[in-house]
Amino acid sequence: EAQLVESGGGLLQPGGSLRLSCAASGFTFSSYEMHWVRQAPGKGLEWLSYISSSGSTIYYADSVKGRFTISRDNTENSLYLQMNSLRAEDTAVYYCAREGQQPGYNFDYWGQGTLVTVSS
Amino acid sequence: QSALTQPASVSGSPGQSITISCIGTTSDLGSYNLVSWYQQHPGKAPKLMIYEVNKRPSGVSNRFSGSKSGYTASLTISGLQAEDEADYYCCSYASSNPFYVFGTGTTVIVL
């Protein structure tokens, strides 16, 4: 069965940077589009970013555009999220999620999440 | 693009049926039949329950069903069970950024 495991979360000060990783197993990672979704404490889900299976197409939510960078390494079965210029409002649990197969447009597997806390 | 609108909570007794609504706009629910529903228990990751309005992934109970009319999508849970107590989120593909819009979330309470 598909499995996604995030890592890299932690506590950091405003303005700092962090790189999240998502290790995929149990499926052919290079065939699937992937996403990052976050959830602030006690709040709802927020879509952040999309990357195509090859990595050639990328989209970001306006809330993180210019600060966050999504990438993937299909040889390592890994997804990444580089987060720069972090703000207090970026405090959240960050999930990687796999997009379901055609036509897609849903998230059929999720990781357990990794907590990012931005605080001085 | 604002979040899709869901009721904050819905409650029901075991065995009853409940329905959660999800109201969107022309840019999302009004334009696409690409609505999905997610169940989230406290401290856990979301789980896909319904996709493309009314399709169930393998392994999801047939007590869960979805529908859509105009700008409103709905999730119905029939034969309510204690294990159904959780938060539920709808999600729709949208024509503009952000390309995926989630609902505000609904807490289902089993009395």
Image (cartoon, coloured by chain):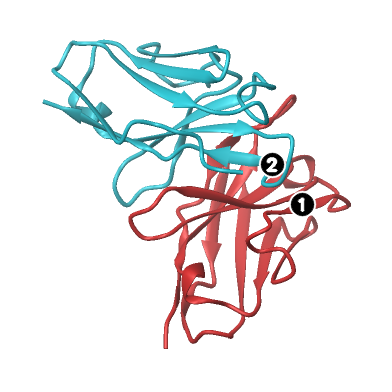
Label 2 crowd (10 A; few <14 / some 14-19 / many >=20): many
Nearest the camera: B37 or A31? B37
Left or right: A29 in relation to A24: right
* Chain letter matching colour red: A
Q: Above or below — where is A32 with respect to A89? A: above
Residue pictured at 80% horizontal, 58% vertical: A75
Please give the name of the residue rendered at 42% of the width and 82% of the height, measured from the top-left corner: A119
> Residue A100: x, y in percent?
65, 32
Cα distance in 3D space between marks 1 and 2? 8 Å
Q: Position of residue A6 (x, y in %)?
A: 54, 61
Q: Are marks 1 and 2 on the same chain?
A: no
Mark number, residue A59: 1
Q: Are marks 1 and 2 in contact (CB under 8 Å)?
A: yes
Crowdedness of circle 1 by 10 Å Cα count: few (<14), some, many (20+)?
Answer: some
Q: Position of residue A82 (x, y in %)?
A: 68, 71
Q: Secondary structure at mark 1?
A: strand
Q: Which residue, given by chain and number where applicable, does mark 2 sit on?
A: B99
Q: Quadrant of the C terminus of chain A?
A: bottom left
The quarter of the picture where the N terminus of chain A appears is top right
SS state under label 2:
loop
Query: Looking at the image, can residue A26 be seen?
Result: no
> Residue sitting at 27 percent across and 27 percent down?
B84
Amino acid on which disc 2 is placed: Phe
Q: Residue furthest left?
A: B111
Q: Chain of mark 1?
A: A
Amino acid carrying mark 1 in the image? Tyr
Question: Label 2 is found on which chain of the structure?
Answer: B
Q: Determine if residue A72 is in view.
A: yes
